[in-house]
Amino acid sequence: MNHRDPAEARARAQARLRRGMFLLPSLFTAGNIGAGYFSIVQTIAAISGDTVMHLDWAAIAILFAIPFDALDGRIARMTNTCSDFGKELDSLADVITFGVAPSLLAFVWGFHFLPDSINPVLHQHLVQAGGFVCFLYLMGGASRLARFNISHDAQPRNPGRPDRKYFVGMPIPAAAGLLAATVHFFGGIPVGEGEWWVSIPWLVLVGLSGYLMVSTWRFWSGKEINLSRSHPFQLLLVLAIVLYVMLRFSNVVLLTIALIYMFSGIWARAAYSWSRRRRRPEEPSVSSQPDPATHS
């Protein structure tokens, strides 16, 4: 009996540790949802007062949610605690944080505060078009997540290097990060308090983000990066430098990263189409030279 008690105690301790390991990825997902909820609350609060501060905080909350979303899946794979519940919870969290929150932020920042001094018809058309395009962005994000959940070994239309892994379509956190980084770049100052014409390229950017999510173009996933093989001290130094630069110059750095990632997918698609046209040989025509066998 004395030999069984320590064994049972170890088994119970391992069971508790296992349950804690399953809980750990869900905690990061909960942080993702919390950031999305905070962003929505801040966007609504911006309508009634202190617009600039609330809109900037709403954008920052979405940007903070991106590392949470990246870590929950990676931690689940590292600890071998992947579950169907975790996958469904992660998808629902992404719809809230990277779908609803940025679409609401995009509409309020880019169209809600348009000045009444512009042409009333133009004002009405811009607000209506903004609401419609922001809704299309939300639908594109939800469709992107649904396709990701049911796809098994999906291949992009423009395949890349076989030693790298790619997303099919722009991932929704990257699209949300692009919109949030743009708002943060302007310090949360809405379009209505600046130049009203900014709402036109903003309309294009929001619509383009929605389209890229449902496209079948390849976007680099970075999943082949294995941090465990790197030297820990060198990695810590690099991470510290990157973190300092991102915090110190967040307005410029985050938007630059988001734009580079978006245009990398567009460039990859354009380069693939161009290379295919170059490699496509012309159909060999029937040789006009006489066949020697016919003259033998």
Image (cartoon, grey):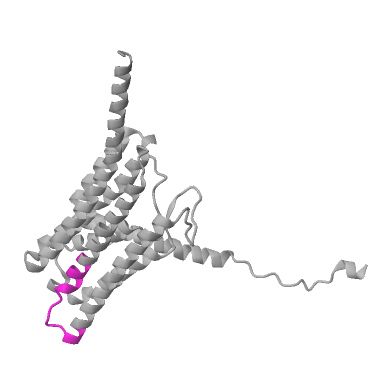
In the depicted view, which residue is nearer to us: 270 or 177? Answer: 177
Looking at the image, residue 218 sits to the left or right of residue 240; the answer is right
Q: Which residues are magenta?
A: 105-122
Name the residue at the left extreme: 49
Query: Can you tell which quarter of the image residue 202 is in?
Result: bottom left
In the rendered view of the protein, which quadrant contains the C terminus? bottom right
Query: Residue visible at 24% across and 74% down?
Result: 130
Residue 14: tell me if it is visible. Answer: yes
Q: Residue shown at 33%/52% (left/top)?
A: 88
| Residue plotted at (47% across, 63% down) | 271
**What secondary structure is the stretch in magenta mostly built from?**
helix
Q: Can you say whether 36 is above or below 232 in the image?
A: below
The image shows residue 82 at horizontal and vertical percentages of 36, 43
Find residue 177 and report its image quarter: bottom left
Residue at 29% of width from left, 36% of height from top? Answer: 19
Question: Foreground: 176 or 117?
Answer: 176
Residue 168 higher or lower than 281, as above or below: above
- Does the magenta run of residues contain 112? yes
Task: Specify whether residue 205 is in view.
Answer: no
Query: Is 57 on the left-hand or right-hand side of 294?
Result: left
So how many labels did they put on this image? 0
